[in-house]
Amino acid sequence: MSIKALSADILIVGAGMAGLSAAAHLHNKGYQVLVVEKSRGVGGRLASRRIGQATFDHGAQFMTVRYPRFASAVAQWQQIGVVQEWFTSTLPGNKAHVRWCGYPSMSAVAKDLAKGTAVTFEQRVVFLEQRDNDWLVSMASGEMISATALLLTPPVPQTLALFNASSIFLPTGTMKRLSSLTYDRCIAVLAVLNGPSAIPIPGCIAPSQNPISWMADNQQKGISKVPAVTIHADASFSYEHWDLDRQKSGSILLSSAQPWLSSKVIDFQVHGWKYAKPKQIHKDPSLTISLSPPCILAGDAFAGPRVEGAARSGWAAAEALENLIRNH
Ligand SMILES: Cc1cc2nc3c(=O)[nH]c(=O)nc-3n(C[C@H](O)[C@H](O)[C@H](O)COP(=O)(O)OP(=O)(O)OC[C@H]3O[C@@H](n4cnc5c(N)ncnc54)[C@H](O)[C@@H]3O)c2cc1C
């Protein structure tokens, strides 16, 4: 949708799990919320893609549940068919959590969360101006939105770059803590096969030697009509090959994956996740940058490097914003 209002009670930057969880919470509390997203759809790292008849989850592969609020959200999604149980892990070294996957793909979860919330796409936030009573937020398109309160959910290095471009200076201690939050990269290959893969039941494997950290058969998973395999390179391969030719890196990964493919690759695409998973987690689930006008940071780097962590951070930020707005 295009931006209709040039003002909002609460402007949320980023339509990933953290931003959308916060948006749904605040929308239900009666706030006028607008989410601004630079890409063409919702989900962020909860991402799905199609190549012809093949469907791939190429970011987050599944969700696990550790806390009651997320358990109840997953139970509701299961009831309406937005998630289904994929498997309970028997992989060595992994805890026996149920692995839930979105249906018809992981992005279904984000689409469900976004229902009822105003989200505007292909709008990259490039500048923030803190004024006496509100924030003025500028997009690369030249559009501007004023908001009483601001929630920023991009990966932390991107938020720091935005602060820097906006000449917003954080206290030294805060800056030091935020700058120490770094992320692993991940090069992902999405391969369409002309026959079934040799990936064992339930359709995934986490090889213990590099360069592959994870492979999933999206047809066995139940989301692709035709054989479609997602391959995730491990962090060191992804880092070393980041600036090299992506198709070449994809070909190296496909050669390494050969024992589990067993069929011919008829098409493939390569995607790079620069901020795949945070390596360190901030001590609190959200971070207040400004009390008045309010500005809060959230995302998986604040409550755990997974889908549930992003949701919990979004909820924590939403509750913190409610308190600040009440006292604003
Ligand atoms: C390859 C991979 C595999 C993973 N596997 C799993 C898994 O199996 N299980 C699991 O639980 N987790 C997994 N994760 C982690 C999980 O996907 C993340 O923890 C979670 O989705 C992060 O959500 P978020 O909202 O914090 O961030 P994001 O999803 O990154 O959302 C941030 C959003 O902000 C937008 N944005 C950024 N800058 C701007 C700007 N200037 N203006 C407007 N919009 C902007 C981005 O486009 C993005 O949509 C995986 C991640 C990756 C990459």
Image: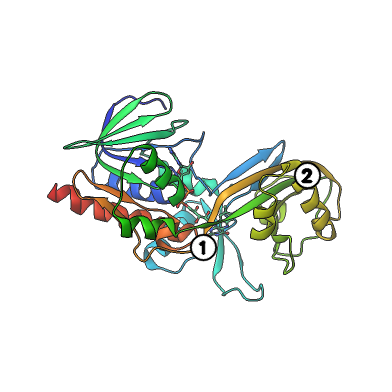
Q: On the picture, is 315 further left or further right than 94?
A: left
Residue 281 in the image: above or below residue 50: below
| The quarter of the displayed image where residue 285 is located | bottom left
Q: On the picture, is 11 further left or further right than 51?
A: left
Q: Nearer the viewer, residue 165 or 100?
A: 165
Q: In which quarter of the image is the N terminus?
A: top left
**Callout 1 touching callout 2 (CB < 8 Å):** no
Q: On the picture, is 170 further left or further right than 96?
A: left
Mark 1 / mark 2, whichever is N-terminal: 2
* Image x and y of residue 187, in percent: 66, 50
* Image x and y of residue 101, in percent: 57, 56
From the image, tell me which residue sits under label 1. Answer: 279
Of the residues shown, which amino acid type is indicated by label 1? Answer: Lys
From the image, tell me which residue sits under label 2. Answer: 248
In the image, is the residue at mark 1 within 8 Å of ligand 1 by its beta carbon?
no
SS for dot 2: helix
Residue 4 in the image: above or below residue 256: above
| The quarter of the displayed image where residue 99 is located | bottom right
Mark 2 burial class by Cα count in 10 Å: few <14, some 14-19, many 20+ = few
Look at 43% across and 31% down and name the residue there: 123
Could you tell me if residue 103 is visible in this image?
no
How far apart are the two marked residues, 1 and 2, measured between alpha carbons? 27 Å
